[in-house]
Image: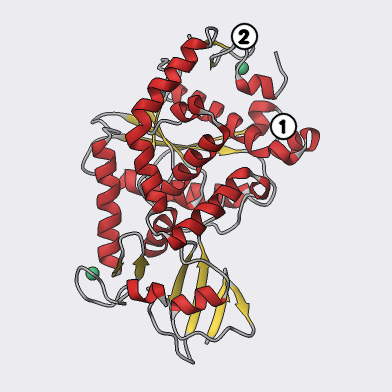
């Protein structure tokens, strides 16, 4: 998987088969992120495979 | 994993591939059913709390952040069936490297929707940017200064525009945080003033505030913005780090993770109790004697419960 968090690419992404696993492996909470797989917003159970481009957006912040 | 059980991957309404998991429902929804849910919820909240009336002029507090941009978008949508007049107000506090970006977004949003925009700056109004002021006062109370100053300007300019109401982009997370903060600080009169549709004090110089997004979780606001192609700024206000609010936000999100729906339950509890709290606030205000009536600040002439308003006290003027 090619992974980015808040627009920054992550060199060694953690192993994860689903969005939920990825969020928890990154130490984030499902409550604070949205995840796109290959440009599409995806639910927590969506599966991630080798070639996928995954974007994690932290969307809960101040201001 | 526990969360996998709550996420089938398919839309609960139509069975198509889902775009988002809403653990507080709990349900997965496709993009078009999420958008429908989102818009229906905002419209229902506006209707239930009689936030808007035909013919009203609504000042929209537009920071350029995702919440106020999505609120403007929704109010504009509502204005196509309910004739209301929108006028956005953006406060430029003067926060280097943060506000300039959101100011651009505010301008873009307004021109896209054809909504007039008034930009008011701390520099012009207070002869100092927030950065400049905090250099002298220290950043520890940044949010207090900024909040009081912004509220003052928003009220003043909304009144000058002849607005019937000011729309504020507070979402359900903001409200849940404020409720918890006020409980922990034992500040019921503040909570009364925070009222979602009306305050503890009525005064013609105070423009009534409405919060169309107060039943909408922050993450949903972001998801809607992403789906609708509304630009969102990911930068965080540089002063927000230190605040008590950040701690409460983190705590609430941790509880939400274990017990989905908690934030919305806090908002509902506040709603149900707010009448009692408002009565309590009125009682405390009366008991305090000198706070019984809203007068005018002797320094700036804006409405104030004391001789000098909280803004002038903060700025040590008058
Ligand atoms: Zn659907
Ligand atoms: Zn004053």
First reached walking from the N terminus: tag 2 or tag 1: 1
Q: Position of residue B46 (x, y in %)?
A: 28, 39
Q: Residues within 10 Å of mark 2 (few under 14, many from 20)?
A: some
Image side of residue B81 versus residue A33, left or right? left
> Which quadrant: the N terminus of chain B?
bottom left
Closer to the camera in the image, B206 or B58: B206
In the displayed structure, B260 sits above or below B214; it is below
Q: Does mark 2 have its CB less than 8 Å from ligand 2?
A: yes
Q: Secondary structure at mark 1?
A: loop
Q: Position of residue B186 (x, y in %)?
A: 54, 30
Q: Residues within 10 Å of mark 1 (few under 14, many from 20)?
A: some
Which residue is most to the bottom? A50
Q: Position of residue B288 (x, y in %)?
A: 53, 11
Which of the 4 image quadrants contains residue B12? Answer: bottom left
Q: Residue at x 28, y 77 (%)?
A: B17
Image side of residue B31 versus residue A2, left or right? left
Say which of marks 2 and 1 sits in front. Answer: 2
Specify whether residue B33 is in view: yes
Q: Residue at x 28, y 42 (%)?
A: B45
Q: Position of residue B198 (x, y in %)?
A: 37, 26
Residue underneath mark 2: B298
Closer to the camera in the image, B99 or B181: B181
Q: Residue at x 49, y 83 (%)?
A: A53
Q: Residue at x 58, y 45 (%)?
A: B245
Per the model, the C-alpha gap separating discs 2 and 1 is 22 Å
Q: Secondary structure at mark 2?
A: loop
Specify whether residue B111 is in view: no
In the displayed structure, B116 sits above or below B30; it is above
In the displayed structure, B246 sits above or below B17; it is above
Mark seen at residue A17: none
Residue underneath mark 1: B128
The answer for which chain carries disc 1 is B
């Amino acid at each position: 998987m090619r992974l980015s968090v808040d627009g920054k690419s992550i060199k060694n992404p953690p192993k994860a088969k689903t969005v939920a696993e990825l969020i928890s492996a990154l130490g984030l909470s499902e409550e604070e992120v949205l995840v796109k797989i290959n440009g599409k917003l995806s639910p927590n159970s969506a599966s991630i495979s080798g070639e996928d481009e995954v974007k994690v957006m932290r969307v809960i912040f101040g201001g | 994993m526990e969360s996998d059980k709550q996420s089938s991957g398919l839309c609960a309404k139509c069975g198509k591939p889902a775009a988002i998991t809403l653990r507080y429902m709990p349900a997965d929804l496709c993009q078009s059913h999420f958008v429908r849910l989102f818009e229906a919820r905002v419209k229902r909240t506006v209707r239930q709390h009689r936030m808007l009336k035909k013919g009203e002029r609504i000042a929209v507090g537009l920071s350029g952040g995702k919440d106020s941009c999505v609120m403007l978008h929704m109010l504009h949508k509502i204005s196509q069936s309910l004739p209301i007049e929108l006028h956005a107000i953006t406060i430029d506090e003067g926060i280097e490297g943060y506000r300039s970006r959101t100011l651009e977004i505010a301008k873009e949003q307004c021109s896209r929707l054809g909504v007039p925009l008034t930009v008011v700056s701390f520099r012009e109004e207070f002869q100092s940017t927030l950065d400049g002021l905090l250099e002298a006062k220290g950043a520890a109370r940044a949010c207090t200064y900024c909040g009081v100053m912004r509220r003052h300007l928003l009220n003043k300019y909304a009144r000058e525009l002849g607005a019937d109401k000011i729309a504020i982009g507070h979402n359900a997370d903001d409200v849940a945080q404020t409720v918890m903060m006020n409980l922990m600080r034992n500040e019921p009169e503040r909570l009364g003033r925070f009222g979602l549709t009306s305050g503890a004090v009525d005064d013609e110089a105070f423009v009534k505030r409405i919060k169309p997004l107060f039943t909408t979780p922050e993450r949903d606001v972001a998801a809607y913005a992403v789906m609708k192609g509304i630009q969102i700024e990911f930068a965080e206000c540089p002063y927000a780090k230190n605040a008590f609010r950040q701690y409460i936000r983190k705590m609430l999100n941790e509880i939400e993770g274990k017990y989905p729906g908690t934030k919305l339950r806090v908002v509902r509890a506040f709603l149900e109790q707010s009448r009692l709290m408002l009565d309590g606030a009125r009682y405390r205000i009366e008991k305090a004697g000198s706070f019984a009536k809203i007068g005018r600040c002797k320094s700036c002439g804006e409405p104030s419960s004391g001789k000098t308003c909280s803004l002038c006290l903060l700025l040590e003027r008058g």
